[in-house]
Amino acid sequence: MKNHLPVLRQTALAKSQRVVSYLTPEEVKTLVETALGGRQGERDSLLILLLFQTGLRISEALSLTPSSIQKLDGQPVLSVIGKGKRLRTVSIPVRLVDRLKSYAYEKKLGVSQRFFDINRSRAWQIIKSVALKAGFNKRVYPHLFRHSDAIERLRQTGNPRALQLHLGHASSMMTMRYLNTLSEQDAIKINSEVSFDL
């Protein structure tokens, strides 16, 4: 019997069922420490941390300026122009904001000057080089940090809708592919944090 799902929906469904490759927080820590030992260590380690802790696409990260850092309900956020030139707000840890502000101060960056004055190709080279120096066998590339952020957020929150908004996915199907990476232990941990006040 012929499947009645349209071909595009079948493709999206197949993609959502794949297990996504990612880095663990420990692996990211190793990369950050390795990057710090390089010639542009402060910049390179900051770029890696930013990609992991915000889930930004590399183009979004490279376009950030000090004026991108804002507050929403007292919490630091990044104002980012994402895919399709859509403006979105992305949460960012306070410690990372402090590091970005210190970096901007040290480098005497104006409010509209980019934190990372490099192009996408150079960012790829930096990340690949750091991974090689760290002795990684797996392929490490900028978008892998986005996947890693997504997995870590799902592990800690168990909330795919919040993740969809955070990543700026137009379709929930894109976000659902991260669910396949969660283990039974992850699910138990997430569900054990649910409380019932009865």
Image (cartoon, grey):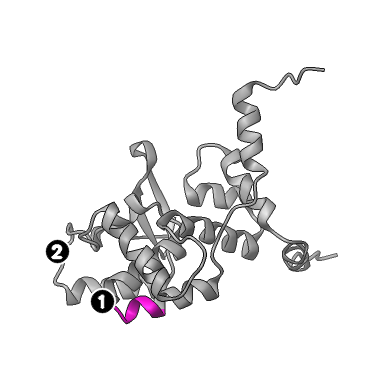
Q: CA distance from mark 2 to mark 1?
A: 13 Å
Task: Indicate the quadrant containing the C terminus: top left, top right, bottom left or bottom right.
Answer: bottom right
Residue at coordinates 22% horizontally, 58% vertically from top-left?
A: 118
Secondary structure beneath dot 1 equals helix
| Residue 102: mark | 1
Identify the amino acid type marked 2: Gly
The x, y position of residue 54, in whole percent, is: 44, 60
Residue at coordinates 58% horizontally, 64% vertically from top-left?
A: 152
In depth, the one of 158 and 184 nearer the eye is 184
Where are the magenta residues, as a range? 33-40
State which quadrant residue 127 falls in: bottom left
State which quadrant residue 185 falls in: bottom right
The x, y position of residue 103, in whole percent, is: 24, 74
In depth, the one of 123 and 133 nearer the eye is 133
**Number of marks in the rendered image:** 2
Relative to 3, residue 151 above or below? below
Report if the CB atoms under discs 2 and 1 are less than 8 Å apart. Answer: no
The x, y position of residue 176, in whole percent, is: 63, 45
Q: Estimate how packed mark 1 is, as few (under 14), some (14 to 19) or many (20 or more) residues with alpha carbons within 10 Å.
A: few
Identify the amino acid type marked 1: Ser
Pointer 2 residue: 110
Residue at coordinates 47% horizontally, 76% vertically from top-left?
A: 29
